[in-house]
Image (cartoon, rainbow, N blue to C red):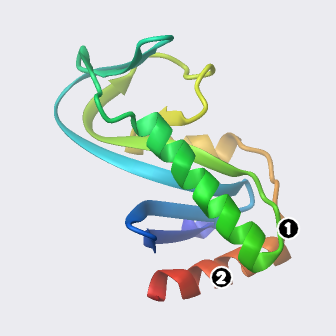
Amino acid sequence: LRGAGYHVFHDLRRDGFNIDHVVVGPAGVFAIETKFRSGNGEIEFRNGEGLFVGGRKEEDDPLLQARRNARDVHAMLKEDCKIDPWVNPLVVFVGEWRIKDKWRNTAARVLTPEQIGSYFDRRQPELTRNEIKLIATHLERSVKC
């Protein structure tokens, strides 16, 4: 991603919690929640029931966690940088997992690490170079705190 003009920040600490990764680049701002699960199989979303990994329901909703992280990053940028970018919530499952559905009906996209590059490649530009620089500079300071 870095070669395509993206800045990647790891472990952004907030009040009492952390955001695993924040990515900023031409396609926008992304708050990424990373989940590690042993085993392999399918990950699917069942409307009204939730997220299932290997046929078992996830008790801690990673989709909700990703949305909360995105809202928190958005609020921080709006307050500190005086800009109002949409922050996209993503959940990335690491391991031998396959995503069963296209995830069009969820507020957070679910991906595997292998899908990340093509996901960003398909997105249309949303931020200018100046906006990317402003956000990246602010996040650099936040990560070091």
Q: How many marks?
A: 2
Q: In the rendered image, which residue does mark 1 sit on? A: 128
Q: In the rendered image, which residue does mark 2 sit on? A: 138
Disc 1 element: loop
Examine the rendered structure and indicate whether residue 131 appears above or below residue 98: below
State the residue at coordinates (69%, 40%).
Answer: 122
Tell me which amino acid carries mark 1: Thr
Residue 27 is drawn in which quadrant?
bottom right
Label annotation for residue 107: none
Side of 76 where 46 appears, left or right:
left
Disc 2 element: helix
State the residue at coordinates (41%, 43%).
Answer: 92
Mark 1 nearby-residue class (10 Å; few <14, some 14–19, many ≥20): few
Of label 2 and label 1, which has the lower sequence position? 1
Side of 92 where 67 appears, left or right:
right
Side of 40 where 102 appears, left or right:
right
Tell me which amino acid carries mark 2: His
Mark 2 nearby-residue class (10 Å; few <14, some 14–19, many ≥20): some
Q: Is residue 44 visible?
A: yes
State the residue at coordinates (46%, 88%).
Answer: 144
